[in-house]
Amino acid sequence: MNTRNRNTRKAYFVAVAQFSTWCERRKLTLLDVQPIHVAAYIETLMQARSKPTVKQHLAAIRMVFDWLVTGQVVPLNPAHSVRGPRHSVKKGKTSVLSAEEMRMLLDSIKTDALIGLRDRALIALMGYTFARVGAAVQMKVADYYIQNRRGWVRLHEKGGKVNELPC
């Protein structure tokens, strides 16, 4: 599997294991699995799981069958033609701190030690740029730069996206 994120690999493993158990109960081997079987499994999942979870399971099943096709274990990917549920997020769930709350949070961090300075810098970066923790801790010294007398940060986000924001 080409997925670099360890948590995604774990989630995909669980998804594929559950699909394998579902197939085993129905006496389906790898070569027996057809698009109708994958679609039936997805419909079953829809009754008990959220749409994002079902989409993740379908992505995992597609990925493992792609790998099996590449390895010439199965001739075709039966999950390729199966459509998952539509789901798009219109409004984020992350709450935003007010300016006063952010100031209280930053002031509560002790800065008499290096660890406190580090924590304060990370929390300020994430609070003011809405950066993910992963993007914030992956930053290099070169990701902070000056342009037109103003400080900027370069954040490397998921999927290879790069965001450049003023400080």
Image: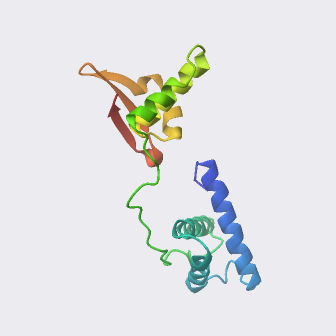
Name the outermost residue toward the left.
148
Hey, which quadrant is residue 116 in on the image? top right
Q: Quadrant of the N terminus?
A: bottom right
State the residue at coordinates (34%, 34%): 165
Q: Where in the figure is residue 30, as x and y percent of width and height?
A: 68, 77
Hey, which quadrant is residue 70 in on the image? bottom right
Hey, which quadrant is residue 12 in on the image? bottom right
Q: Where in the figure is residue 124, as x and y percent of width and height?
A: 46, 30
When the figure is inspected, residue 27 is found, relative to residue 91, above or below; the finding is below
The one of 19 and 28 positioned closer to us in this rendering: 19
Q: Quadrant of the C terminus?
A: top left
The one of 22 and 65 positioned closer to us in this rendering: 22
- Is 166 on the left-hand or right-hand side of 79? left
Total marks shown come to 0
Name the outermost residue toward the top.
112
Q: Can residue 138 be spotted in the picture?
A: no
State the residue at coordinates (44%, 68%): 87
When the figure is inspected, residue 33 is found, relative to residue 70, above or below; the finding is below
Q: Where in the figure is residue 92, as x and y percent of width and height?
A: 42, 54
Q: Can residue 48 be spotted in the picture?
A: yes
State the residue at coordinates (67%, 67%): 16
Please say which color scheme the image uses: rainbow
When the figure is inspected, residue 100 is found, relative to residue 17, above or below; the finding is above
Q: Where in the figure is residue 147, as x and y percent of width and height?
A: 27, 23
